[in-house]
Image (spheres, grey):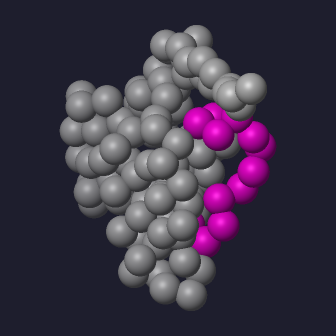
Amino acid sequence: MTRFKDFGSPAADKTEPLTFALYGETFNAVPAIQGKVLMEIISDADPNDPSQSAEMVTGFFDKVLLPESLERFNTLTSSQDKIVPVETLAEIVGWLVEEYSGRPEELRGA
């Protein structure tokens, strides 16, 4: 007898964008991401290498924010008037990772 398992379409029910607010603006992220991409992002978070973690955070937003939101997010996070601390960026990444993974785990090192 052949061993077989059908893993179905686990992300099929995830069609609504993830939404968060920052400085009164609402930003939309894709409803789901590839598990492989999520694993790569998590593995790139290195608490001993701040520059690598910073690249991971920047790359993460590039991959998950919808184009219009990404443009506004980049403008906001480059503003001289509205400062977004690294801790806030890490909180947003952590929340999105939790939502994408379906587990309430904190992203370490971001």
On the image, the x and y values in percent for residue 19 come to: 51, 26
In the rendered structure, the answer to whether residue 40 lies left or right of residue 110 reads left
Residue most toward the front?
A: 1
Percent across and percent down for residue 27 are: 41, 30
**Residue 106 rendering spot, x and y as whole percentages:** 72, 56
**Picture residue at 55% right of the left edge, 77% below the top:** 46
Residue closest to the eye, 85 or 67: 67
Q: Residue at x 35, y 59 (%)?
A: 58
Pick out the residue farthest to the bottom.
48
Q: Residue at x 63, y 35 (%)?
A: 99
Above or below 24: residue 58 = below
Q: Which residues are magenta?
A: 99-110
Q: Magenta segment: does it hold 46?
A: no
32 lies left or right of 72: right
Is 54 placed above or below 33 here?
below
Question: Magenta stretch containing residue 106, yes or no?
Answer: yes
